Amino acid sequence: MGMTITEKILANASGRERVSPGENIWVSADILMTHDVCGPGTIGVFKREFGENAKVWDQEGVVIIPDHYIFTADEKCHRNVDALRAFVKEQKLPYFYDPGTSSYSGVCHVTLPEKGHCRPGEVLFGTDSHTCTHGALGEFATGIGNTDAGFVMGTGKLLIKVPPTIKFVIDGKLPKGVTAKDIILRIIGDIGVDGATYCAMEFAGTTIEGLSVEERMTICNMAIEAGGKNGIIAPDEKTIEYVKSKTSKPFKCFHSDPDAQYLTVRRYKAEEFVPVVALPFSPDNVKSAKESSQVKIDRSYIGSCTGGKITDFIFAAELMKGHKVKVDTFLVPSTVEVEQAMKEIKIDGKTLVEIFAEAGCVEPAPPSCAACLGGPVDTFGRCNNGEVCVSTTNRNFPGRMGSKDSQTILASPYTAAASAITGHITDPREFLK
């Protein structure tokens, strides 16, 4: 009997020939990532359990990326970053993307692949639920809590249960105006926010093969919104080319066997997908954008690890070009690299930044998570009482983007841009004919 890609990676990381769903195994980590929200807690656990003078298991394996509450006057947020700085100096860690310096990058989930920390076949743990993003690079990546992270920091190992795998096969060519965000929202709408609880969500098929690496990241990013342990896509030539452009470190690719055992296999035809939104207050409250056109919005937000990559801004600019927005439209590039690309990439002779300015968008914010996780009161794009925001982010729970009396509607960059132009939820195909 064969194994899935997730099982093969975990078997390799545990020094075993094979593993099966439900087994508890010790796996060796390649990378542990933490950020400003969870980093101080992780460091506290590490020092409590291993001693004040203990050293991390591998200096090269610990990556620290402040990104959540960066551009704020909040003193407690600054204190968290100061704690990280002190730890990095004490441990002599080489991978610290320090705010206020030339090394600052932005959102951890986009920084990790940009800086070459994501490689096929490896195991990546992160103190953030959306660490599952990096399964798009053919690795096992999952979010863990501060206690587990503190243990990994000291030992490089973690005891985990091997998850069963649900396979999603999508074949065909996507219609114009439909993106990876629409794919994953549709899947979450179909199976529910608990439909893949502690399962590996494996995505395959000709549609997935046709997507860019960044669009694949969008899909794996939201595996956690269905309860998934990890999202994963088998590496192919696109993956290998991307990874080799970011790092010279060696890696090993794994693929599912033809006779691998799945909990279930769900099949989709690409041509049947349409632009969708997730209405408040759950990522599985999914409706087509067309049938949600009566929903008025107060603002549009394009950013985050899910929707703030350069491909996302290209989608939005493609649709906005030549139009004016009717509501406040906030733009938050995920990283410094994306921020720079927005100033360089052109559509019909105009840069993305110029297109957004002419459309009347708010000037782009510095790269960070910004309002995706609410944040302090001075956070860029934070939602106020009663406001309805269409957003390219990943969660729409009460208070997720600010006031608990605001509402967040999840959408693709195309849909967020189209809705900004009309002032209500709008099917982007109305502008892309």
Image (cartoon, grey):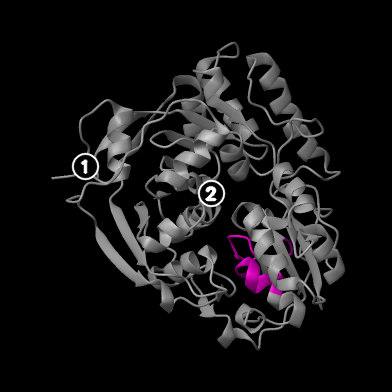
**Image-based side of 399 in relation to 130, left or right:** right
Q: Quadrant of the C terminus?
A: bottom right
**Quadrant assignment, res 432:** bottom right
Q: Amino acid at mark 2?
A: His
Q: Residues within 10 Å of mark 2 (few under 14, many from 20)?
A: many
- Picture coordinates of residue 363 (x, y %)? 85, 59
Q: Are marks 2 and 1 in contact (CB under 8 Å)?
A: no
Identity of the residue drawn at 30% across and 28% down: 14
| Residue situated in front as seen by the camera: 175 or 362 | 175
**Span highlighted in magenta in the image:** 392-417
Residue 49, position as x, y percentages in the image: 50, 20
**Residue designated by label 1:** 20
Mark yes or no: residue 196 visible. yes
Q: Is residue 388 above or below residue 231?
A: below
* 192, above or below 47, in the image: below
Q: Which mark is residue 130?
A: 2
Frontmost residue, 383 versus 19? 19
Percent coordinates x, y for residue 390 in the rendering: 68, 71
